[in-house]
Image (tube, grey):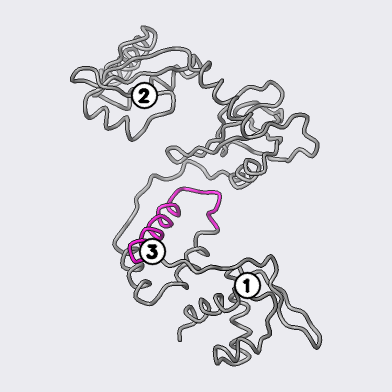
Amino acid sequence: MKKSERLNLELAFLSDKVVFQLQDLMTTFDISKRTALRDVAALEELGLPLYSEVGPGGGYKITQHRSMIPIYFNNQEVSAIFFALKALKNLSSTPFSQSYPRITDKLMASLSPSQQATVRMMQGAVHYYTGASISHPQFLNDFLTIILETRPTEILCPARWGAKPVEIQAFELLYRNGIWFCEAVLLSSKEWVTLRIDQVEAFKLIKEPPTVFDRSQLHKLKQHYEKTHHDIAFYCLLTQKGAEKFEKNHYPNMHLRMLGEQYELYGGYNKDEYEYMIEYLLSFGAEVKVQSPPALQQGYIAKLKMLVSNYE
């Protein structure tokens, strides 16, 4: 029997036990003491919470014990799981980057030889090509932790607020075009902000926060922000190809609808997003025609003229 298969059977064997002896594994699986010791170490690596007790009645005790009910997947479901893991692993960075190899090893150890062969064939047949990350945020996992624990934090983000630390409470993580963002509220002003996590240079938990919002309150603050912040309406016409580009890259404040035989891109933006809106619309090339507001149309045309002047 292969080690991976034996470890899987040992996990099932220990699923209803709180304590066990090394001899239990040796007898049940017909293995030597040395192999049993190695298996115990491997089971601990796989995540089985246990510790050893010395003395006449000693052995191993499983802590935080929960029934480990086996879940069975067919080949298509197994392939889907590993396909998703490989896709996530190819992101520039995630809060769980260090966990994916371990998760993959655990899942692979639970499969039959034929399923393992199918997974390896799939991994060799599917390849991902993604753009290089602009930067790697050092506090990404910390941000996820404070979101899950609903804890306020003091951060230093010179690119956004200079050298002065600010206190925030984070609500959501966003990933777009190789960059991680965090939506949060500034505790001092109750202002809703979206910040780049890679620009955060210091991170410190607040021991006694002045104000803490629960998830429902944070959600209401976000809704209010979305209704009042993007207060400049815009309209553009898109071709079929433009509509396809929109589906691949757009933001919550942007929408698409049919207008006769053309598509209309519409929504709202804030005055601080004016330059970004122009850059975004330029990405559509000849597939867009800016309609309104006049200021956006004029800024778009001025940018086009500047680009043309580079070749005159």
Q: Amino acid at mark 2?
A: His
Report the side of 36 relative to 109 (left or right): right
The mark total stands at 3
Question: SS for tag 1?
Answer: helix
Q: In x, y percent, where is residue 53? A: 77, 79
**Earlier residue among tags 3 and 1:** 1
Q: Amino acid at mark 3?
A: Val
The residue labelled by disc 2 is 255
What's the magenta bit mostly, secondary-structure-wise? helix
Few, some or many C-alpha atoms within 10 Å of disc 1 (few <14, some 14-19, many ≥20)? few
Give the CA distance from mark 3 to mark 1: 24 Å
Q: Is 62 drawn above or below residue 202 in the view shown?
A: below
The quadrant of the picture occupied by the N terminus is: bottom left
Q: Identify the residue shown where x is 58% and y is 87%.
A: 35
Q: Amino acid at mark 1?
A: Glu
Give the CA distance from mark 1 to mark 2: 50 Å
Few, some or many C-alpha atoms within 10 Å of disc 2 (few <14, some 14-19, many ≥20)? some
Q: In x, y percent, where is residue 19? A: 70, 78
Residues in magenta? 74-98
The quadrant of the picture occupied by the C terminus is: top left
Q: Identify the residue shown where x is 51% and y is 21%.
A: 226
Give the CA distance from mark 2 to mark 3: 36 Å
**Earlier residue among tags 2 and 3:** 3
Quadrant for residue 201, please give it.
top right
Report the side of 206 relative to 303 (left or right): right
Q: Identify the residue shown where x is 71% and y is 31%.
A: 167
The residue labelled by disc 1 is 44
Q: Which mark is residue 151?
A: none
The residue labelled by disc 3 is 78
